[in-house]
């Protein structure tokens, strides 16, 4: 354990737990990404009717009892499942772990909408008699609920936070974990991003009113980043959570190391509620590169944020072209084309789906890219079929959100 503020400490990822619309662990998720298998399905949501969504199907009773599910939230269950899976994957002796030195930092896009919508609907069945409103509503809807449910389930007495960072939140959870470890606020961080977004009709209705909700006769082809036929976002749920440690602690216990968090950055557009700004995105990417002491040509994979909205795809491509346009050996892919937009979990899941590239020398594709929008044209985009590349060392993960919040995380293959 270190004391004081030590920014020279190297920070590594040692365990991964996830649930995605096309996989409930890293091996399954990765296999489906390389095989081109989508997790988007038909879905029926109150008031909206039939839509398309990325739906997770994990064992909710693996780490919780039925009474926990009745009392808690869907996003709490996602968080508990992923956090426990990460601890197991990391090989941490949980019984001997000092729980007050563990921090939980989970990024979210929104929270509480699901529970409030459910309760309003419930009282509508009783002529709006508020006496039937559940007494569980407040603890279900407070912003710290997902991380708090993890601490209760796992007996963690260290700090817990959810970080509201719109769709940049998955990266934000990992960034905060690295900062708290370097400040010696904690010795182990459980960090990433989570989302229960598909369980609120409001998010579907809002995207629909914006003309940004994807439709397609084949659900697997609905999410189409960079494609001229794209027509909007596929809403998804999910979670991606890691155990994050100082390298010295990981080596001391003989941990396997998935990768090193080499650099990161966050900034704000300060321009619009919804429309992104390529200039600020470029600035964020360049700042992360500077902090990682890397040049653009040092990046092997760029995991793009692209949501399959016209302006979003175009603005991000402008930023990528400005930074990586001359880097012929840097390749760009997109995970949302497989699972939809998992909101608070998006950044984490998209990064984790790429981390196995360090070992298998493969870059998963962007599927459903049949007709590349000329305004998004870059030769480095990996379309429809995986690409092989020997010696992959670095991944840069973009994750941007509404109100103009941008985040970038750079992961490097661990090198002694």
Image (cartoon, helix red, strand yellow):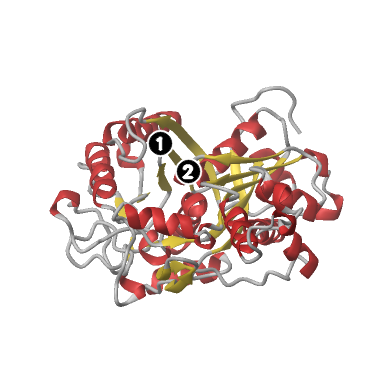
Q: Which mark is residue 403?
A: 1
What residue does disc 2 label? 166
Task: State the quadrant of the C terminus.
Answer: top right
In what element is the residue under mark 1?
A: loop
- Report the side of 34 relative to 71 (left or right): left
Q: Earlier in the sequence, mark 2 or mark 1?
A: 2
Confirm or deny contact between disc 2 and disc 1 (CB under 8 A): yes
- Within 10 Å of disc 1 (Cα), the crowding (few <14, some 14-19, many 20+) is some
Q: In the figure, 410 relative to 383: above or below?
A: above
Nearest the camera: 369 or 113?
113
The percent position of residue 13, horizontal first and vertical second, equals 60, 48
User: Residue 266's mark?
Assistant: none
Quadrant in the rendering for residue 231: bottom left
Q: Position of residue 153 (x, y in %)?
A: 78, 55
Q: Residue at x 47, y 72 (%)?
A: 44
Q: Quadrant of residue 308?
A: bottom left
């Amino acid at each position: 354990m270190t004391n004081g503020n030590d920014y020279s400490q190297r920070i590594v990822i040692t365990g991964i737990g996830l649930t995605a619309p096309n996989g409930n662990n890293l091996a399954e998720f990765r296999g489906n990404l390389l095989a081109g298998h989508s997790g988007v399905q038909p879905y029926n949501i109150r008031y909206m009717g039939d839509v398309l969504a990325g739906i997770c199907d994990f064992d909710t009773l693996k780490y919780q009892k039925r009474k926990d599910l009745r009392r808690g939230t869907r996003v709490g269950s996602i968080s508990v499942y992923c956090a426990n899976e990460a601890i197991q994957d990391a090989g941490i002796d949980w019984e001997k772990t000092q729980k007050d030195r563990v921090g939980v930092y989970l990024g979210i896009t929104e929270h509480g909408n699901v529970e409030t919508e459910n309760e309003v609907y419930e009282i509508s069945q009783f002529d709006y008699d508020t006496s039937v409103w559940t007494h569980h509503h407040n603890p279900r809807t407070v912003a710290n609920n997902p991380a708090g449910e993890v601490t209760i389930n796992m007996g963690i007495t260290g700090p817990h936070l959810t970080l509201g960072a719109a769709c940049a939140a998955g990266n934000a959870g990992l960034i905060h974990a690295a900062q708290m470890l370097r400040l010696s606020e904690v010795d182990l961080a459980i960090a990433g991003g989570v989302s229960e977004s598909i369980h609120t009709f409001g998010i579907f209705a809002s995207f629909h009113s914006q003309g940004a909700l994807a439709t397609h006769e084949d659900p697997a082809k609905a999410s189409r980043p960079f494609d001229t036929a794209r027509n909007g976002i596929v809403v998804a749920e999910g979670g991606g959570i890691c155990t994050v440690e100082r390298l010295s602690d990981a080596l001391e216990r003989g941990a396997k190391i998935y990768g090193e968090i080499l650099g990161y950055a966050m900034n704000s557009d300060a321009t619009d509620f919804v429309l992104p700004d390529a200039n600020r995105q470029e600035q964020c990417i360049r700042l992360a590169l500077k902090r990682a002491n890397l040049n653009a040509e040092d990046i092997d994979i760029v995991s793009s944020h692209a949501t399959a909205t016209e302006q979003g795809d175009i603005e991000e491509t402008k930023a990528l072209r400005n930074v990586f346009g001359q880097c012929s050996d840097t390749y760009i892919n997109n995970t949302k084309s497989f699972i939809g937009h998992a909101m608070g979990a998006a950044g984490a899941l998209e990064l984790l789906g790429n981390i196995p590239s360090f070992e298998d020398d493969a870059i998963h594709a962007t599927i459903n890219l049949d007709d590349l929008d000329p305004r998004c044209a870059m030769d480095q985009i990996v379309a429809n079929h995986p690409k092989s590349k020997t010696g992959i060392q670095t991944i840069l993960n973009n994750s941007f959100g509404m109100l103009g919040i941008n985040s970038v995380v750079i992961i490097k293959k661990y090198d002694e």
